[in-house]
Image: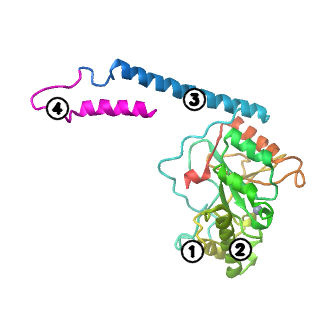
Amino acid sequence: MSIRGGLVLLAVAALLSGCARPAGTDVRPRHPLKAPPALAADLQADKTLIRAARLRAEQRRIAAARRWGLKQVPLTAPPAPVTKPRITTRHGFEVEGHEEEGLPPVFTTIPTEQKIVFLTIDDGAEKDPAFLRMMSELKIPYTAFLSDYLVKDDYGYFAKMRDAGIVLNNHTLHHPYLPALSYARQKREICGMQDVIEKHYGERPALFRPPYGNYNEDTLRAARSCGIRYAPIWNEEVYVDHWEYREWDQRIHPGDIVLSHFRGRKDWKGTMTDMVRRFLDKVTAEGYAVARLEDYL
Ligand SMILES: [Zn+2]
């Protein structure tokens, strides 16, 4: 609604409240819920403008989907939930004292009945400008988990990502198998990456993903001491040429977290945009929209 439209509603509300009514006189308008004709025309004009803007945005998305070679236009995610779901550690993924000590929950799925999935992209080796363009043009949200040894040759690439509204999260300094390390060394890997992200991108992450999805109690205690609140892992992984599933049913489910990687032709048979195409074509065909993980945490 425009400012003018808002003022019109305020004016109508003031009339209805009758706050300036002299005692003993009834000045309530005869049709209290109807704005006067000139104002009603303004409201109508506002609605028409909003509809036209929505239509233009939709046309841009259709054009972008065609340009990037998608089979269908991706579905739009529902608005962020007003009440956040309660995130708990997936059964079987707990460490000793997990809940009692308030360690960051480890989960593969966000509890929701909505047909949404979350895309998370790890490591940071490939820095493909076409990927940034594709995601911005299609307006697909995702969450990045970065490892310093792979991103440090081009911090600027991920600054562009952050500027596009993507949250950059912690995936350690050197991508080690953490359970093999002492508490102190795990802490250096995790807190060190918090410092790198804060220095280059201005914020300390709340999300941490252990490399390979492997962790122990020390990992989560160290992560918590570095300011980490959540340790999302994943339920499916999408590659440039196939999907892999954690569940026996080999399907995607509402709220699933999907993993992929910043990889290019050196690592797999295609580009990042090929991977995104494979991801979007499947989730859209199955009636899922891609939502923003941070909106649910
Ligand atoms: Zn990784």
In the displayed structure, does residue 157 sit left or right of residue 228?
A: right
Q: Where is residue 99 in the image (x, y as percent from the top left)?
A: 54, 69
Q: Which residue is drawn at 70% across and 60% down?
A: 145
Report how far apart the C-alphas of labels 3 and 2 lie in the structure: 47 Å
Secondary structure of the residue carrying tag 2 is helix
Residue 66 belongs to magenta span:
no
> Residue beneath label 1, please?
97
Q: How far apart are marks 1 and 2 (CA)?
A: 22 Å
Residue holding disc 2: 189
Q: Residue flagged by tag 2: what amino acid is it? A: Glu
Q: Earlier in the sequence, mark 3 or mark 2?
A: 3
Relative placement, left or right, of 266 versus 121 is right
Q: Nearer the viewer, mark 4 or mark 1?
A: 4
Q: How many marks?
A: 4
> In the rendered structure, which amino acid carries the disc numbered 3?
Ala
Say which label, 2 or 4, has the lower sequence index: 4
Alpha-carbon distance for marks 1 and 3?
Answer: 52 Å
Please report whichever mark, 1 or 2, sits nearer to the chain's N-terminal start: 1
